[in-house]
Image: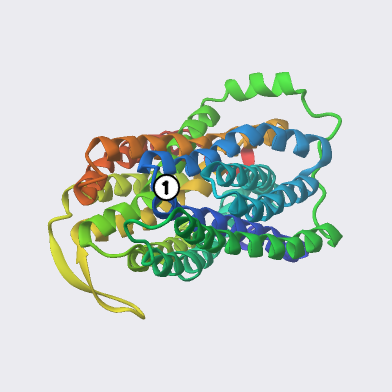
Amino acid sequence: MSETTKPPIVPRNILFPFILLATCFAMWGLSNNMTDPLVKAFLKIFPELNTAQTALIQNAFYGAYFVLAIPGAVIARVFGYKKGVLIGLAIYILGGLLFYPASLMLEFTPFLFAFFVLAGGLSILETNANPYIIAMGPEETATRRLNLAQSFNPVGSLIGLFLCKFAILTKLEVVNQKITDGMQPEEVTAIQVEQLNIVMTPYFIAAVVLIVLWILIAINKNMPSVKGDADQANVGDSIKFLFSKTNYLFAVVAMFFYVGAQIAVWTYTFHYITGQLGIADSEAMNYHIIAIILFSVSRWMFTGLMAFFKPSTLLAFSSLMGVVCSLGVMFGGGIAFEGYIPFVGPAPFTLGIVCLILISVFMSLMFPTIFGLGSRGLGTATKLGASGLIMAILGGAVITLLQGKLFVLFGGEENMGPAAAKSYVVPLICFCVAAAYGIYARFTEPADPAAV
């Protein structure tokens, strides 16, 4: 192929289907980031729980990715990616609707079940949507195309954060002010009902909006047909093939640790900032919003840089910078200064908080890049391979719980700021693993991606 006829990232004939799928990426970003702050918020709703116990939200959420990824791959093989996307969206919608009966039960466990169902839908959705995007155009531009689609993910993340800040956290703080010592049981119940209704409403509304997206995808006739053809290798042969691919196996390991780092970093952002500055959760959200805005902008930036640098090179660089920033979070909390937050005004900062925000910049390209690099050369095993990469999202449950245990061990219930700082040794180790995969991929990927 000549230099003047470079393959397009997104062929024009599938531009609208690409936008519909990119909207799915935005919608799971909305749920992911609306959920992270609730680990801390549920401590007020269910005071009998500790931080490690409320972190079970992330176990339910990301554990569902592990459980439902293989069924998602089976759906892709049998029915094709489009039906897989529709089934995933349908279960996602069901999970959102389940928040209503969960709010009526006044218990923590029904919410864990709702989170599990919602994330189960996301698992099937991602297992199909990520390789669907890769298969939509030339393999030479597959990783860039996936990065482009994933660039819509933080747009949904920002929407989720604003919903969490204004529709959940701010309202919860108003209700929480009513809590006093010596309240009668019926008064406690009334406040708990109010709290749970606040948590439930955004998820329920999001489910209703998703019904519209489901219909648009279902009736679109231009969605590319990528089906489980009869000549595909059987599952046993595909599994043997995948286990013979060192690059793929390393990518699965890297994905496990990267997703664990991302979810842990964002989950304990609120513990770290409120502990450092002594501010409310809704105020700490302002700092997290900055991080997600930079995450969004950086993903677009890195997608552009892939025209000049190999994705593996950028992955290795970003992961190493994640290590550096994690060290800053751990040891920079005592270096304080005044800064400025757009639309908010002057605000206190520490070097640790700045490093915590910058971690999001360097995390922005990691998921789609690891997914794209790990998927290269899989051929007919791509659908099953995608499920393995999605199953690795289990790291979000395991690593977050591990950091929560360390947080409690370091005395986080009484000394939140220092304990949160020490617990960031966990993401630091995770970024080391991602960096190792980036370096490995840099020296093993073919010079011509089309030759795979």
Q: Dot 1, how many residues are within 10 Å of its Cα: few (below 14), some (14-19), or many (20+)?
A: many
According to the picture, the residue beneath numbered tag 1 turns out to be 262
Seen in the image, is 173 located left or right of residue 33? left
Q: Residue at x 76, y 65 (%)?
A: 212
| Residue positioned most to the left | 335
Residue 374: quarter of image: top right
Q: Residue at x 69, y 58 (%)?
A: 21
* Viewer can see residue 378: no
Viewer-closest of 343 and 376: 343
Viewer-closest of 139 and 169: 169
Seen in the image, is 13 located left or right of residue 449? right
Viewer-closest of 93 and 4: 93
Q: Position of residue 437 (x, y in %)?
A: 42, 35
Q: Residue at x 68, y 50 (%)?
A: 92
Seen in the image, is 115 located left or right of residue 343? right
Viewer-closest of 324 and 185: 185
Q: Residue at x 30, y 49 (%)?
A: 321
Rendered-image quadrant of the C terminus:
top right
Say if 62 sits above or below 167 in the image.
above
Identify the amino acid type marked 1.
Gln
Q: Position of residue 161 (x, y in %)?
A: 47, 64
Seen in the image, is 228 located left or right of residue 318? right
Question: Total marks drawn?
Answer: 1
Q: Position of residue 334 (x, y in %)?
A: 13, 56
In terms of secondary structure, where does tag 1 sit? helix
* Viewer can see residue 203: yes
Say if 115 sits above or below 441 in the image.
below
Say if 165 sits above or below 41 in the image.
below
Color theme of the render: rainbow
Q: Position of residue 124 (x, y in %)?
A: 68, 42
